[in-house]
């Protein structure tokens, strides 16, 4: 039997609504249903079972679809539903009844995108389009399809305070944010993605909830002081009364898969999830998610953000792993940026060798057990045996732009030539590539951190806390003025993509290059097979170049040369005859032979494909 959400407000076939909420801290509870004017239509007492789950049923005449409702907690007052599907008037207001199966889907034939074919495009729904909505994203899907990406990854969409936010302060994890278009808007986006052959990945946050509008503690022991996270008390995944907390998050993962037809979830910062139970919550989520995807006959993926450098994240549970499908690889980003930009501040100080880039390509983790100076301890475990397509690599993402470079894009920091060279290296690795919105045309709009908290004290704490957290990444002597004010609406508006620049130099040239690069990955099997065992990386530390030889079971091969230095690079060409497939500079040779030397000008790169023997 297919899974369905049982908590919250659920509309039955006869139109009646069943309200269900876990509230073990309450002995009594009722639900208040409101009319269109906000007046009380009915107050219904709820029955409590032995586990603290309260239930009430209301006929359609009393609680029609579209009505608002709230739970009444003695000595606390009215509170929104923890499993609210819609918060149309903000995080402090009543929840709204949504008919989960009312949307007219057109994607019955959709089966998803195989993991090996994922080329992920990360975007923020509020800044990607002028409209700042899910519909605004949907209107530009033909552009993304023509770019060649295969998956759209939206930063968190769960309801958060105010109208503008990165989404990591979400407090209603089942309610797509109203300013973006709410439940109907997100379903339209998912349906449109599938119509254009694109997967939809939803970024979810299972390590904390935002502070404003977070009323979970009024209902039950969702949090614990046994562990601390950067955001405060940890979620209670392994303590007393944690079974229902775990269910809440397993339900959430299945909810996006089923009710929204999502093709994957990106799990934020899993190092902030503290769980020492025999069956970790992430393993439980993975088991349930993969089983439901199989029942639906679809490819669907769980991708973790993790700074643990722990291969157990992606290994099967049978060998002690969590069973997730892929994880982000920060080491590749840091290693390449330390070379391309010269940045050695903060965690970039652990990198700076061309050999680090080579190891990130060949072994996925640069730090796989040795001492990391910035961390002041040993870090990571070996992952060389794990397939390349179990890792997601990138040269830009939302965090790195905003935090490491105070909103500046790579082309602004290192120049267009070096961005092209870095992108060529990225698409020559066995990892799955990820782009951040606007990267493909060297967007010049910044991407800063922004919020719209209603609590002035919280807003000020965020300003100061952000500066303190990322002080190690600022140049010496830089003060708080390096950060745009997160609460300022102008900060948010500046981050909107400048679509008018697409047709202008130098942006049009960068866009054409990215389109060609993505198309090349699709055409050439060695560039997309994820086979680290068929990859060989060589480098010259002094000359600051590296080469990447990729093979395929069918006999095809590619050879990438990248000069990341300031002088000419002389790179030995592997055996065989090679023709140029793509280059960042028109002066690069169009054909080379094995045993000869490929000369690359500074800050250039080229990909060659081997010519089959005649």
Image (cartoon, helix red, strand yellow):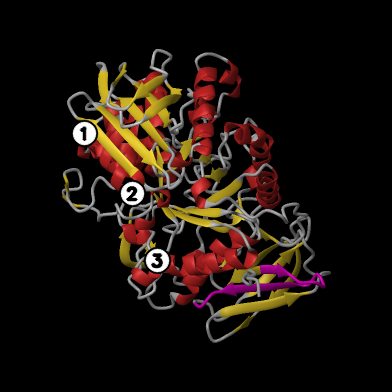
Q: Residues within 10 Å of mark 3 (few under 14, many from 20)?
A: some
Residue 406 sits above or below residue 322 on the image: above
Q: Confirm or deny contact between disc 2 and disc 1 (CB under 8 A).
A: no
Would you say residue 23 sits in the magenta stretch?
yes
**186 relative to 591 in the view: left or right:** right
Q: Which residues are magenta?
A: 9-24
Q: Quadrant of residue 597?
A: top left
Residue 181 locus on image (x, y percent): 67, 45
Instruction: Indicate the secondary structure of the residue bearing disc 2.
Output: helix
Residue 31 locus on image (x, y percent): 67, 71
Instruction: Indicate the secondary structure of the residue bearing disc 3.
Output: loop
- Which label sits on residue 52? none
Residue 227 sits above or below residue 394 on the image: below
- Mark pair 3, 2: CA separation: 20 Å
Q: Residue furthest front?
A: 614
Residue 460 sits above or below residue 173 on the image: above
- Which label sits on residue 316? 3
Residue in the image at 59% along x and 66% along y: 294
**586 relative to 593 in the view: left or right:** right
In front of the other: 457 or 59: 59
Earlier-in-chain disc, 2 versus 1: 1
- Mark pair 2, 1: CA separation: 23 Å
């Amino acid at each position: 039997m297919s899974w369905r959400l049982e908590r919250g407000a659920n509309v039955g076939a006869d139109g009646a609504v069943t309200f269900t909420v876990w509230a073990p801290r309450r002995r009594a509870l009722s639900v208040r249903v409101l009319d269109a004017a906000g007046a009380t239509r009915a107050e219904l007492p709820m029955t409590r079972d032995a586990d603290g789950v309260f239930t009430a049923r209301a006929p359609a005449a009393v609680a029609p679809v579209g009505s608002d409702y709230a739970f009444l907690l003695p000595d606390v007052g009215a509170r929104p539903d923890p499993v609210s599907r819609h918060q149309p008037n903000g995080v402090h207001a009543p929840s709204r009844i949504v008919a989960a199966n009312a949307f007219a889907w057109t994607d019955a034939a959709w089966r998803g995108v195989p993991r090996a074919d994922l080329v992920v495009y990360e975007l923020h729904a509020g800044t990607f389009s002028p409209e700042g909505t899910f519909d605004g994203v949907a209107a530009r899907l033909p552009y993304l399809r023509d770019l060649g990406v295969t998956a759209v990854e939206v930063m968190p969409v769960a309801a958060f305070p105010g109208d503008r936010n990165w989404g990591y302060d979400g407090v209603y994890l089942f309610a797509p944010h109203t300013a973006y278009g709410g439940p109907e808007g997100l379903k339209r986006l998912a349906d449109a993605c599938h119509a254009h052959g694109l997967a939809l990945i939803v970024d979810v946050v299972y390590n904390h909830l935002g502070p404003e509008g977070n009323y979970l503690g009024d209902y039950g022991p969702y949090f614990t002081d046994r562990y601390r996270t950067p955001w405060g008390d940890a979620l209670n995944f392994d303590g007393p009364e944690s079974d229902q907390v775990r269910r809440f998050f397993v339900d959430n993962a299945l909810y996006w898969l089923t009710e929204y037809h999502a093709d994957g979830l990106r799990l934020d910062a899993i190092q902030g999830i503290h769980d020492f139970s025999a069956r970790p919550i992430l393993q439980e989520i993975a088991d349930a998610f993969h089983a439901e995807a199989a029942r639906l006959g679809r490819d669907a993926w769980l991708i973790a953000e993790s700074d643990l450098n722990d291969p157990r994240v992606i290994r099967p549970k049978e060998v002690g792993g969590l069973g997730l499908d892929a994880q982000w690889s920060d080491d590749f980003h840091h290693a390449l940026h330390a070379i391309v930009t010269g940045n050695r501040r903060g965690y970039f100080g652990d990198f700076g060798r061309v050999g680090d880039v080579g190891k990130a390509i060949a072994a996925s983790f640069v730090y796989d057990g040795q001492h990391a100076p910035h961390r002041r301890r040993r870090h990571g475990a070996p992952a060389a045996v794990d397939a390349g397509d179990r890792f997601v690599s990138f040269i830009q993402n939302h965090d790195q732009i905003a935090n490491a470079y105070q909103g500046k894009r790579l082309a602004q920091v290192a120049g267009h030539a070096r961005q092209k060279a870095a992108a060529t290296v990225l698409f020559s690795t066995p990892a799955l590539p990820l782009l951040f919105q606007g990267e493909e045309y060297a967007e010049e709009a910044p991407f800063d951190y922004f919020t719209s908290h209603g609590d002035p004290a919280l807003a000020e704490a965020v300003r100061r806390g952000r500066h303190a957290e990322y002080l190690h990444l600022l140049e010496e002597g830089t003060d708080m003025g390096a950060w745009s004010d997160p609460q300022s609406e102008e900060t948010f508006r500046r981050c909107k993509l400048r679509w008018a620049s697409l047709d202008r130099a130098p942006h049009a040239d960068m866009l054409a290059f990215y389109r060609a690069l993505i198309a090349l990955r699709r055409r050439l099997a060695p560039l997309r097979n994820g086979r680290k065992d068929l990859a060989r990386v060589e480098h010259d530390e002094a000359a600051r170049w590296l080469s990447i030889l990729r093979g395929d079971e069918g006999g095809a091969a590619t050879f990438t040369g990248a000069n990341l230095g300031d002088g000419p690079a002389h790179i030995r060409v592997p055996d065989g005859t090679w023709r140029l497939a793509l280059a960042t500079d028109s002066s690069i040779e169009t054909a080379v032979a094995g045993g000869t030397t490929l000369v690359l000008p500074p800050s250039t790169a080229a990909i060659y494909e081997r010519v089959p023997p005649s």
